[in-house]
Image (cartoon, rainbow, N blue to C red):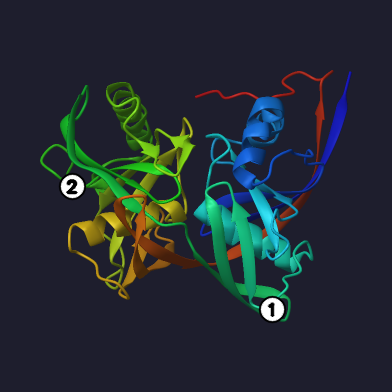
């Protein structure tokens, strides 16, 4: 029976976990991180399941694995792994992984203060400030975000008719703003939002199986996240959200790709302009600072260039074992 060791460094970004696999990640084939993501999904998804699901992880677990860059002008490539799958892009994962990588000596940027990061969704430019060995903040210029659909409606079993937009910020999000049948996220418990989200996501992908496909990368498709909006907690915050991902998780951070998608939605609806700050709260009240850097296009679709800024912290070190002789080598979920 095979026994596999993985040396991991654990941290969190604004409350949401990030587990960097420092040693033990598989060699992957492909000319870019999108192709390497495909190779990982075909042959090594057992690693993701084993490290993210119970008993080694939990329903909110999220992580990453570093790879050499495909283009030597860049600093590194990254693969995002979490309970929801192997994501094209992860914002809180970028902030946390860069923080961990810099503080632990896993990343040595060619240009101090800048990391050029190859993700499956595309090239991401990262800025950071480090002082006395601690990364104070990380800000990344995300891949272009855009609105894919507006004012769609579906009938749900508990909330009745819901109206929503779909926007892309590295993943596709169904965005549910306050409305007659949904007064706002502050009205519900996290467990209720999870239950509503499972049904809504299933209904959306069944109704629109071929609608939400990235025009420049067909491997990125389908609504994977649901963003529920509500009233901010702090007076100076712009907005608040609760993002559902995986099967049982509400993001503890404000969600970087979700913030990108929501800024694209707000620009589309003339609620946000280029250059304005967008202070986005999470379900627990932690914040990211978003900003629209410029207008852009994705294929023929109008888009924005978003920047997301936040902070992360290291809290632990693990050597984890996946042994095929043990029960549950690929993990499990209970709820």
Residue 212 screen position, x and y as percent? 35, 35
**The N terminus sits in image quarter:** top right
Q: Mark 1 and mark 2 in contact (Cβ < 8 Å)? A: no
Q: Is residue 62 visible?
A: no
Residue 308: image quadrant is bottom left
Q: Nearer the viewer, residue 30 or 226?
A: 30
Q: Nearer the viewer, mark 2 or mark 1?
A: 1
Q: Nearer the viewer, residue 194 or 171?
A: 171
Q: Is residue 156 above or below residue 89?
A: above
Is residue 102 rendered to the left or right of residue 211? right
Q: Secondary structure at mark 1?
A: loop
Q: Secondary structure at mark 2?
A: loop
Residue 130 screen position, x and y as percent? 66, 78
Residue at the limit of the structure toward the bottom, as seen here: 131
Is residue 292 rendered to the left or right of residue 101? left
User: Dot 1, how many residues are within 10 Å of its Cα: few (below 14), some (14-19), or many (20+)?
Assistant: few
Residue 38 screen position, x and y as percent? 62, 34
Q: Is residue 186 visible?
A: yes
Rendered image: mark on residue 112: 1
User: Dot 2, how many residues are within 10 Å of its Cα: few (below 14), some (14-19), or many (20+)?
Assistant: some
Residue 2: image quadrant is top right
Residue at the limit of the structure toward the left, as seen here: 180
Q: Earlier in the sequence, mark 2 or mark 1?
A: 1
The residue at 64%/77% (across/down) is 113
Q: CA distance from mark 2 to mark 1?
A: 43 Å
The residue at 31%/59% (across/down) is 263
Mark 2 sits on what residue? 178
The residue at 65%/47% (across/down) is 32
The residue at 57%/53% (across/down) is 93
Residue 49 screen position, x and y as percent? 65, 30
Rendered image: mark on residue 71: none
């Amino acid at each position: 029976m095979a026994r596999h060791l993985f040396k991991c460094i654990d941290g969190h970004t604004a409350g949401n976990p990030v587990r960097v696999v420092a040693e033990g990640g598989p060699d992957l084939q492909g000319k870019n991180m999108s192709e390497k993501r495909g190779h990982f999904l075909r042959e090594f998804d057992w690693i993701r399941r084993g490290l993210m699901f119970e008993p080694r992880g939990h329903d909110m677990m999220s992580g990453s694995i570093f790879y050499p860059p495909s283009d030597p002008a860049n600093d590194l490539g990254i693969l995002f792994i979490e309970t929801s799958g192997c994501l094209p892009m992860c914002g809180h994962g970028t902030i946390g992984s860069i923080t961990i990588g810099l503080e632990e000596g896993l990343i040595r940027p060619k240009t101090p203060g800048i990391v050029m990061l190859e993700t499956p969704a595309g090239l991401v430019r990262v800025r950071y400030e480090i002082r006395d060995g601690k990364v104070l903040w990380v800000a990344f210029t995300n891949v272009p975000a855009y609105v894919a659909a507006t004012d769609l409606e579906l009938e749900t079993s508990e909330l009745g008719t819901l109206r929503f937009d779909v926007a892309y910020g590295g993943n596709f999000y169904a965005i549910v703003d306050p409305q007659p049948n949904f007064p706002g996220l502050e009205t519900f418990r996290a467990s209720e939002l999870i239950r509503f989200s499972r049904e809504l996501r299933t209904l959306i992908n069944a109704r629109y199986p071929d609608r939400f496909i990235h025009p420049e990368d067909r491997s990125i498709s389908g609504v994977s996240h649901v963003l529920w909006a509500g009233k901010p907690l702090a007076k100076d915050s712009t907005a608040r959200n609760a993002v559902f991902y995986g099967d049982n998780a509400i993001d503890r951070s404000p969600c970087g790709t979700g913030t990108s998608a929501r800024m694209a939605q707000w620009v589309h609806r003339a609620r946000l302009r280029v250059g304005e700050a967008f202070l986005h709260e999470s379900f627990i009240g932690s914040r990211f600072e978003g900003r629209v850097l410029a207008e852009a296009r994705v294929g023929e679709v109008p888009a924005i260039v978003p920047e997301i800024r936040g902070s992360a912290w290291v809290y632990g070190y693990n050597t984890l074992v996946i042994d095929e002789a043990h029960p549950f080598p690929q993990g499990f979920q209970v709820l």
